Image (cartoon, rainbow, N blue to C red):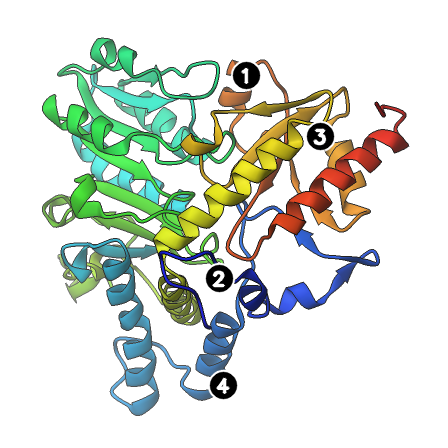
Amino acid sequence: MNGCTETSALNTERIRADFPIFSRRVRGNPLTFLDSAASTQKPTSVLETMDRVYRWCYANVHRGIYCLSEEATCCYEDTREKVADLINADAREEIIFTRNTTESINLVAYSWGRANIHAGDRILLTELEHHSNIVPWQLLARERGAELVVLGITDDCMLDLEQLDELLDERVRLVAFTMMSNVAGTIVPAKEIIRRAHDVGAVVLVDGAQAVPHLPVDVQELQCDFLAFSGHKMCGPTGIGVLHGRRKLLEAMPPFLSGGDMILRVSWDDTTWNDLPWKFEAGTPPIVEGAGLGAAVDYLKDIGMEAIAAHDRELVSYAMEQLSDLPGLEIVGPPAHRRGGVVAFTFRDIHPHDLAYLMDLEGVAIRAGHHCAQPLHQRLGLTATARASFYVYNTLEDVDRLVAALEKAATKLGRGA
């Protein structure tokens, strides 16, 4: 992979050549993939790394005293080092591998939450949250007799930070928020929220599912207590996610799952837990997926996270400019300079599902629905939106194809200008 430096524009032609899927056509058209907020495509380096592990050094990890197991273990554990370096974790032991962001959040809710949230406590969320950062806290609050409180947004989907003074007090034990909305694209002022939460003694979990693949994220600079994200949204495979936690918190937390590999000693009378990070990684881990995630981290770091963020801004600015010229199209969320690579919208009276189907006929893949953020859509008075989301392999020409497909869809349905 020959990426560009962090101060230059991406060479998207060379990047696209790294992704085999872009050699295919969809319904006779070049593939225009605009659904990376849901899951990203995979570069050859990730695919080849996973294939090589399966073909050359596959074995179970950590316990085998033989060549294949040692090689597989090194490959798997090297990824932990790479992830720690990507987010500037203080130590590799703070990196816990899970299945995805959802499992990472559930781990914190189950293990930290059940030990620390009590009747009368408050859990503070925001109106921007994905269901994965709502439902686990709802269940915990009901079980423990705690209260969910929600930080509202403005009409352009920015957090109403003036409400924080009213909501943040000594009753708030946990603040959980997304660093970047998967619907509005809003990039929230994470450092300020974390600082203010810590001022009242609250623990902070950041949902980084959208942010980590697109922005430079430094957990030591943020000072968050937990950070959750997924491999499949950052050019890696499905089935592997990450929970970063402060070592002091992780050491005090009981295991989330129990079984093999998360133990030091088992007898009929008692069990002692393994050291971090393995205390939270019961059973055979996602060995090959771990190798794939390591290759994905290498790929993104070769491009540069600052360059990826700049590329997002360029695409979103152009997309919002072009989409705004379509009569009857309403964009959800803040201006381009305050969002990541996501543009959700409504278009005249065309249902987003119908719109997505018609777009697919032109080879343009977009998302349609509530995007696992029903409370946000309810706040905006919408049942569903269409969503285009961008990544390193998208181009300005992709935006042009999106606009042309929208115009063609409107004409087909008799909603032309």
Kind of residue indicated by mark 1: Gln
The crowd level at tag 4 (other Cα within 10 Å; few <14, some 14-19, many 20+) is few
| Cα separation between marks 1 and 3 | 16 Å
Image position of 371 with respect to 125: above or below: below
Characterize the local packing of mark 3: few (<14), some (14-19) or many (20 or more) Cα atoms within 10 angstroms: many
Looking at the image, is mark 3 or mark 4 nearer the viewer?
A: 3
Secondary structure at badge 2 equals: loop
Quarter of the rendering containing residue 266: bottom left
Q: Which mark is residue 55?
A: 4
Residue 150 falls in which quadrant of the image? top left
User: Which residue is drawn at the image coordinates 30% and 91% (left, top)?
Assistant: 67
Q: Residue at x 25, y 78 (%)?
A: 63
Mark closest to the chain's N terminus, 1 or 3:
3
- SS at mark 3? helix
**Residue type indicated by callout 2:** Pro
- Residue 199 x %, y %: 11, 24
Q: Position of residue 340 (x, y in %)?
A: 45, 39
The circle on residue 237 is: 2
The answer for how far apart the CA atoms under marks 1 and 2 are is: 32 Å
Write down the residue under mark 3: 352
Residue picked out by circle 1: 378
CB-based contact (under 8 Å), mark 4 and mark 1: no
